[in-house]
């Protein structure tokens, strides 16, 4: 089961992420970022057990939203397989913020 948990400055994705959850997760996370008063936030990906390339799309959407809101967003604890997927698409830069 895929879950999103949030604290003041950290978003945590955990569990099994599949295609059917992308829109709901994106909406929920973007709303949280937009309502945050934090200057910087992190998205912790350590507990993702199953995922696909749509997680990369979700990360890019959140990065754009955070930038529009003046929030520095950092991705932490990305699983090596997710980093490899990003590298194939030339998007590994999102994990170096």
Image (tube, rainbow, N blue to C red):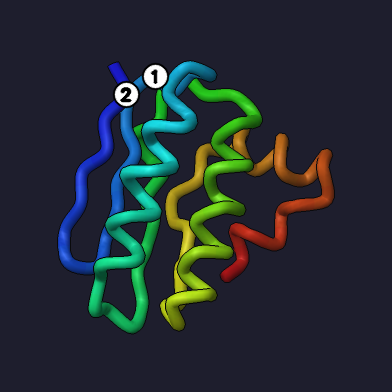
Up-down: is 81 above or below 7?
above
C-alpha gap between disc 2 and disc 1 = 5 Å
Whole-percent x, y for residue 97 in the image: 57, 70
Task: Left or right? Give the position of 30 relative to 79.
Answer: left
Task: Left or right? Give the position of 55 relative to 70.
Answer: right
Whole-percent x, y for residue 82 in the image: 61, 36
At x 35% / y 49%, what residue is drawn?
A: 29
Where is mark 2, residue-wise? 2
**Where, quadrant-wise, is the N terminus in this rendering?**
top left
Which of these two is toward me, 54 or 90? 54
Where is mark 1, residue-wise? 16
* Label 1, residues with CA under 10 Å away: few <14, some 14-19, many ≥20: some
Whole-percent x, y for residue 63 in the image: 54, 62
Which of these two is toward me, 79 or 42? 42
Q: Quadrant of residue 5?
A: top left
The mark found on residue 41 in the picture is: none
In the rendered structure, which disc, 2 or 1, sits on the residue that comes first in sequence? 2
Task: Left or right? Give the position of 74 relative to 60.
Answer: left
Which of these two is toward me, 55 or 46? 55
At x 63% / y 59%, what residue is drawn?
A: 94
Whole-percent x, y for residue 20 in the image: 47, 17
Up-down: is 19 above or below 90?
above
* Label 2, residues with CA under 10 Å away: few <14, some 14-19, many ≥20: some
Do the numbered discs 2 and 1 sit on residues whose CB atoms are within 8 Å? yes
At x 56% / y 53%, what residue is drawn?
A: 61
Number of numbered discs on residues: 2
Which secondary structure, mark 1? Answer: strand
Which secondary structure, mark 2? Answer: loop
Up-down: is 21 above or below 13?
above
Which of these two is toward me, 95 or 35? 35
């Amino acid at each position: 089961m895929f879950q999103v948990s949030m604290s003041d400055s950290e978003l945590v994705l955990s569990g099994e992420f599949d295609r059917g959850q992308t829109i709901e997760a994106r909406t929920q996370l973007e709303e949280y970022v937009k309502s945050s008063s934090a200057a910087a936030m992190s998205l912790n990906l350590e507990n993702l057990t199953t995922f696909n390339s749509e997680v990369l799309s979700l990360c890019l959407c959140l990065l754009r939203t955070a930038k529009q809101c003046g929030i520095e967003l950092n991705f932490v604890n990305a699983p090596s397989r997710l980093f490899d997927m990003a590298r194939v698409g030339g998007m590994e830069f999102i994990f170096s913020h």
